[in-house]
Every structure is written in C-alpha cells, then in structure tokens.
Amino acid sequence: MRPIDLEQLAKFDTPTVCNVIELFDVRPRNSGYMNAEIRACFPQLPPMVGYATTATFRSMSPPPQGKAYGGLNEQLKALPELPGPAVMVFQDIDQPTVAATFGEVMCTMYKAYGSAGLITSGAGRDLDQVQALNYPVFTSGTICSHGYCHLPDVNVAVTVGGISITPGMLLHGDCNGVTTVPLEIADEIPDACTELMRCEQYILDYCRQGNVTPDGLAAARAECDAGIRKLASQISRGERPH
C-alpha cells in the first residue's frame, strides 16, 4: 500500500469518492457515510480530508470539575499521534442539543494545531467568524450560546450522522456530506476517481452537445458503463487504473 496522499484525495468531491469506494466492494453501499443530519456550514469550501479525533460533548449541566471546556487539553495532546491533519469529531450527548459545540475561539485554536475541519452531531455558532477562517465545519444546526460546554470522554467511539466513528478513521467531506474512507484502499482512490470521471464524461459530453436522442444517449451510457465495468475489473484484479 502506498502512502495516502490526502492532497490528491481532496481534489475530488465526496460523491465521486463514494462512487469509487463502491467499486472496491469493501462494504455495503448503504453504509460508511453520514446521514442528512450532518450538513456543511460553508458548502463553498473545498473538500475536507483528515483523520478523526473524537470526543463526546455536553453542555446541559456543569462538568464535575466545574471547568468549562474540560477535556480539551487531553484532546489536543492526542493530535500528534495521528498520521495526518485531524478532523475534530464530536457526539453531542445532550438530547436535545442544548448549546453550541464550537465557536470562533475553538476553531481558531484547532486550525492552529493543523486541524482540517470539525464535525459535530450538535450545533455551532460564530459562523461568520469561522467562515473567515476557511475552516470547514459540519453540524446539525446553530445555537447562539455554549452553555456548560465540556468533553466528558476523549478518543472514544462516537456516533455522528448515524454511523460510528473511531479515532484515526479517514474522513472526506464537502457540500454533499461526509464519508469515511477505508484505509486499506485510500491510496488507490484518486486514480480510480480520475478514471470514473473519464467514463462519466461520455454521457456529459453527449448531453451538452445538443440534439440528444434516445439512441444516442443509450450509446453514450453504454460507453460509460463499459468503462466503469473495466475499471471495476481492474480493481478486482488488484490493478491500478490508468
């Protein structure tokens, strides 16, 4: 397995990455990605790619030690152990969500530590200021206050967007949503994305040239499908797309 080139992964949108993961047949097609509860706050930003560092979040009542943002230092100390930039992943365990998981100060701090972005099953705030940071954040909503915010548990399995996220998982997210990327195939995904997009271009080019007919469209689709079948066959044989 080659080293995982996160910059190459970030060149492709998340739906294309999901399509390619399906071709490797390493998981069911209806698993591994977050549901519609998790939305990009700044959909205009390029794809976010990084490794999960996880925490639970609570703001309904004061932490046992009585200190706001309790657990933060433990979280930050674990970041150097990741193989690349961190994606901060929070499960808000208050039901319903009481206050914002993050704001301008936290996101500024995380970005200074090299974080690639943040995902929370709860809410965010200071969105104008965070947007100015060009720091991708994904939430289920916004709330103006941080309440009694603290992190009861750090570096544990969390549930966000309907899936389990464990520390070190590779994540890819953009305006379309967030998916996990299986580490065992991550280095092969960029080449496969390029080839898949080349196949899809047959249909796009035909539709854009005008004078579309059922027979012509069927021919373009057949050419696309043949290319994708060839790509899937290469993948199944362990060959790199080219």
Image (cartoon, rainbow, N blue to C red):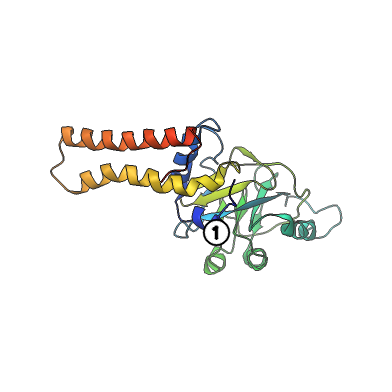
Viewer-proximal residue, 7 or 213? 7
Residue ranking furthest to the left: 211
Q: Residue at x 27, y 45 (%)?
A: 204
Which kind of residue does numbered mark 1 sit on? Pro
**Does residue 224 appear in this view?**
yes
Viewer-proximal residue, 81 or 56? 81
From this view, report whether residue 2 is shown above or below residue 216: below
Viewer-proximal residue, 205 or 166? 205
Residue 89 percent coordinates (x, y): 65, 50
Task: Determine whether, in the image, residue 58 is placed left or right of residue 202.
Answer: right
Viewer-proximal residue, 221 or 70? 221
Locate residue 105: give its quadrant. Answer: bottom right
Locate residue 143: give its quadrant. Answer: bottom right
Task: Determine whether, in the image, residue 70 is placed left or right of residue 12.
Answer: right
Residue 25 percent coordinates (x, y): 51, 32
From this view, report whether residue 65 is shown above or below residue 179: below
For the residue labelled by badge 1, is the local secondary structure a helix, a strand or a loop? loop
Q: Which corner quadrant holds the N terminus?
A: top right
Residue 186 percent coordinates (x, y): 55, 46
Q: Which residue is mark 1?
A: 136
Residue 214 percent coordinates (x, y): 17, 33
